[in-house]
Image (cartoon, rainbow, N blue to C red):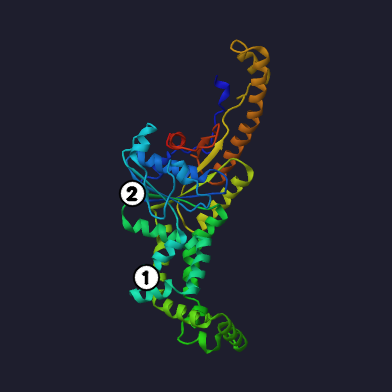
Amino acid sequence: MGFLHAPYDPPVSSPKVSLEKRLKGKQVCVCVGAGGVGKTTVSAALGLGLAARGRKVAVVSIDPAKRLAGALGLSELTGEPCRVDDAGLTEHGIALEGELWAMMLDSKGTFDDLIARLSPDERTREEILSNRIYRELSSAVAGSQEFTAVAKLYELHRSGRWDMIVLDTPPSRDALDFLDAPDRLSNFLEGRALKVLLAPGNVTRGLLGRGAGLMLSVFARVTGLNLVEDLSGFFGSLAGLTDGFRERARGVEQLLRDPITGFLIVTSPEFEPAREASFLHTQLAREQMCFSGLIVNRFHDQGLNGHTTEEVARLLAPRLEPTLAARVAANLADFDILARRDRESVRTLSRDLNEPSPVLVPQLDGDVQDLRGLLAIAGQLFS
């Protein structure tokens, strides 16, 4: 029944380019977009599709909802890449020419690992990791996730173990923080405030002020905790790591702007996510980062396709009882409203992003919960 599927005609006349061709030569693929558009599912399906085509792929999720493990048929994900079992894939009729790995970002663990890598010796490492100020600071940084995310991405890429790393990011406004994280860290490390704190004895020489020093002295007597000593020890230990942090920040920034890194914007046709997609595209251009394609998820492609409700009811009449045929036609009319809205939304996005080849993933009957569902999404991504 041809009237069910409404074709999408892009407003740009350039030839269509497949997603596989767009990602050729890429070693890092960063999926960004608004929340609630299925970005985690798309990232996992993208990894599955690339692995099916012979690539060794690591999918990294920093999505706090932690849905990636379930979608890949795993009970849980750890802070290190774990290979998706071929036996589990075979049970679902999936054969990969490559390998599929997945992990959930452990922000606190990543920050600790970074300290361990940059510490000049074991003593410095232990002093920082055991410091109360560091433990609080690293937990706060872990909550924001941005720098630890790009640090892990940098580490995985430098290892050379994978042909492609697919990164699933938080909702787009947070993703912009993720993109800016290297610059923010570099600015902090090169700022005057940190240089003052790192100068020997500044914390204990009254930098906190006489009144604050007296208050902390009383606090130490009552609680037995010497915060001035902890602050002094923390900043003193950090002094030997700042060059390493700067180098890592520059390396991450270069990787995000390198042509081997591509950014895919994932959206749905609804107004707010589509607007976020346009905003994010502008930010990527401003940051000189490579936009590699637009994926529109949950696209409604079923409708009347130019027919009236009465015409559809008549076409269905030979197969269905008249009352049921009329109800089905009315239902298709409701879907037709969504289909027309989605086509117009994609046309607008194609024009605004100068994107002649958006990848359209149709709205499915239910949520994707397993590998078979991911395979269906992957088929749409690479069709």
- Against 200, residue 243 (above or below) is above
Circle 1 or circle 2, nearest the eye: 1
Q: Residues within 10 Å of mark 1 (few under 14, many from 20)?
A: some
What amino acid type should be assigned to the residue bearing mark 2? Asp
Could you say where residue 153 lies in the image, as x and y percent from the top left? 41, 57
Q: Considering the image in quadrants, where does the N terminus appear?
A: top right
Could one spot residue 26 in this view of the protein? Answer: no
Q: Quadrant of residue 46?
A: top left
Could you say where residue 159 lies in the image, as x and y percent from the top left? 32, 57
- Against 70, residue 303 (above or below) is above
Q: Which mark is residue 212?
A: none
Q: Is residue 273 left or right of residue 377?
A: right
Q: Are marks 1 and 2 in contact (CB under 8 Å)?
A: no
User: Which residue occupies the foreground of this view, 312 or 122?
Assistant: 122
Q: Which mark is residue 118?
A: 1
At horizontal 55% and vertical 26% (from top left) the residue drawn is 5
Q: How many marks?
A: 2
User: Which residue occupies the foreground of this view, 152 or 20?
Assistant: 152
Q: Considering the image in quadrants, where does the C terminus appear?
A: top left
Residue underneath mark 2: 163
Could you say where residue 27 lies in the image, as x and y percent from the top left? 36, 51
Element at label 1? helix
What amino acid type should be assigned to the residue bearing mark 1? Leu
At horizontal 42% and vertical 43% (from top left) the residue drawn is 74
Q: CA distance from mark 1 to mark 2?
A: 26 Å
Q: Earlier in the sequence, mark 1 or mark 2?
A: 1
- Against 139, residue 201 (above or below) is below
Q: Residues within 10 Å of mark 2 (few under 14, many from 20)?
A: some
Element at label 2? loop
Could you say where residue 235 lies in the image, as x and y percent from the top left? 46, 79
Q: Quadrant of residue 303?
A: top right
